[in-house]
Amino acid sequence: MSDCVDIVSIQHEYGIWGGTDGEHVLDFVNALRVPAIATLHTVLRTPTPGQRAVLAELVASVEATVVMSRSAATLLATAYGVDPRRLEIIPHGVPDLPLVDPEAIKPALDLVGRRVILSFGLLGPRKGYELAIDALPDVVAAHPEALYVIVGATHPDLVRREGEAYRNGLVARARAHGLGDHVRFVDRFVGRVELSRWLEAADVFVTPYLNLDQIVSGTLSYAMGAGRAIVSTPYAYASELLADGRGLLVQPGSPALLGRALNNVLEDGDLRAAMGRRAYEHSRQMVWSSVGLDYGRLIARVSGDRRGAVLASTMAAVGA
């Protein structure tokens, strides 16, 4: 492989590499004869000894490690003892979408006349969708046109263990609240173009996640890239990215608090527009062309030549 590859980019998530705590990633790294960089999609605040050891050895074995937030870099330095000079912060990439009025997009998705609250991503019990559904009766009482749309398939690991029991439970929960006309499930994986339309049609995006240590969220990143008003629980990534008025944070566990926050945003068009605009402006550094340039510069530095930077510049020029 060293004859045709200059550098290897490793995407690290504990669950995808196999072995105890994903330890097989170390076998892969140790077999390389070219430089490598690692991008960490998860940094656990309270790892097991095995998880800590695997991540520490991975970081020590590569030329550079990329994280997607300042909080992830701080956690690696303080809890894992990683030298901050070995870390690069490159944001989670997002599509370069125009900032559009949701009302212009709603007709194509049969959403005319609705105030759309959106969540998307793989369904699972740590996403807090139960909290959002439990908050909806108060929202619907104030906004009878409100519709909560959950876009995405159930996580495949969950399907293997229990089929669609989790999704069916969410459907039953909505029915028990009398929300049959106010909750819609798009229960499949959607491609980039369709996902962009759903994001652009949303009045409010909500991530009611229960794990407050979550260090990265692609769904939150994409919602910012679409310029949506965002309501979220204060997990680590949301607390960082939604600072300075870019979103509204609500403590987890209280449907009443979440419902109140959603009502405040739905009632105030100026607030929605201001939050969305701030999120959109912040996300310009996150569009893929910018992220590609960041990776190109890093690759050029690690590999000792300018080919990575030239490639990234070409990607930016064509809007990749």
Image (tube, grey):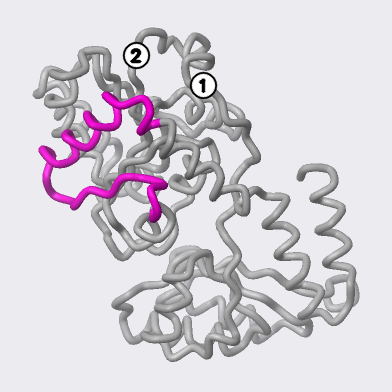
Is residue 244 rendered magenta in the image?
yes
Q: Residue at x 45, y 69 (%)?
A: 14
Which quarter of the figure has residue 129? top left
Query: Amino acid under label 2?
Result: Arg
Does the stretch in magenta take in 6? no
Residue 83 at what x, y percent from top left?
A: 53, 90
- The residue range painted magenta reads 243-272
Residue denoted by label 2: 114
- Quadrant of the rendering where the N terminus is positioned: bottom right
Q: Left or right: 40 with respect to 211?
A: right
Q: Nearer the viewer, residue 306 or 62?
A: 306
As drawn, 86 above or below 145: below
Q: Quadrant of the C terminus?
A: top right
Q: Is residue 150 above or below residue 299?
A: above
- Identify which residue is drawn at 10% across, 38% down: 256
Residue drawn at (39%, 80%) of the image: 51
Amino acid type, residue under disc 1 in the picture: Asp
Q: Look at the numbered disc 2 and give the secondary structure of its residue.
A: loop
Q: Which residue is mark 1?
A: 101
| Rendered image quadrant of residue 237 | bottom left
Pick the front one: 107 or 257: 257
Residue 92 in percent (x, y) is at 56, 56
On the image, the x and y values in percent for residue 278 come to 48, 43
Asked where in the image residue 75 lies, by quadrant, the reply is bottom left
Residue at 39% of width from left, 26% of height from top? Answer: 203
Nearer the camera: disc 1 or disc 2: 1
